[in-house]
Image: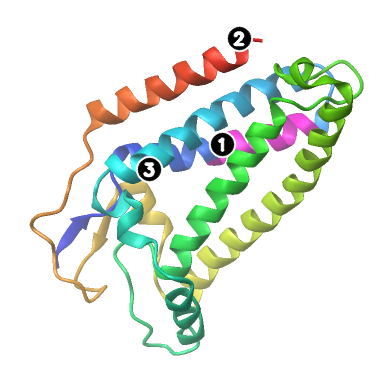
Amino acid sequence: MNKILVWDLPLRMFHWMLALLVTISIVSAHIGGNAMQIHLRSGYTILTLVLFRILWGFFGSTHARFASFVRGPATAIAYLKALRRPNTGRHLGHNPAGGWSVMLMLAVLLLQAGTGLFSNDDIATEGPLAKLVGKAWSDRITGIHDINVIVLYVFIGLHLAAVAFYVFFKRDNLVKPMLTGFKDADAHGEAVQTAQTAGKTWLAATLLAACAGCVYLLITSA
């Protein structure tokens, strides 16, 4: 049985940290009050992580790179239609539909964190850049922030449903590889690639620090 490292450590840490922070953001927003300070800090960190993931999509390991899983819409639609068949081909990395899901989720999170910088709750909390655009525009952006969170809920629901579908109906556990990093290459019908690009931890740390620095400068510049 050939085991192959599919998800590098930086990508796995990104995934679980993002899941935790999104949960914290949702809970703190519903609590309100003093918890909104936690909500703001969680949003800054999410923005940092999303920016890092975008960069890691170009500099990460083979299966973390966008070039390895972003396919045309027709390919994704064909894959979804083929899911009804029990022998649908498996993929070591993201499948064509999953690739689009990743890109759309990153876009939704980027929009949510970005609009949060300019939003206000009409009580005591506002984003660090809200005063730069004035109250009227801040209210408009807050409206986008509130609508987009519903879109985010939909994507989270679809993501969890897809994971459950693959575990129970396709007998393909997507959770374990995101914990260990490894998949069974033989079970996925793909030969082990001896020339895979490995994700460099030092590079990931450098990119993450750069993203954190940019976000810090952004929120303190106001």
The residue indicated by pointer 2 is: 220
**Amino acid on which disc 2 is placed:** Thr
Residue 111: image x %, image y %?
Answer: 64, 41
Considering the numbered disc 1 on the image, is that residue within a helix, a strand or a loop? helix
Considering the numbered disc 3 on the image, is that residue within a helix, a strand or a loop? helix
Contact (CB < 8 A) between labels 1 and 3? no
In this picture, residue 148 sits left or right of residue 21: right
Magenta highlight on residue 27:
yes
Indicate which disc, 1 or 2, sits on the residue closer to the N terminus.
Answer: 1
The residue indicated by pointer 1 is: 20
Q: Residue at x 49, y 62 (%)?
A: 100
Q: Residue at x 50, y 88 (%)?
A: 84
Magenta highlight on residue 78:
no
Residue 66: image x %, image y %?
Answer: 36, 53
The residue indicated by pointer 3 is: 12
Give neighbour class at mark 1: few <14, some 14-19, many 20+ (Cα, 10 Å). few
Q: Which residues are magenta?
A: 19-29
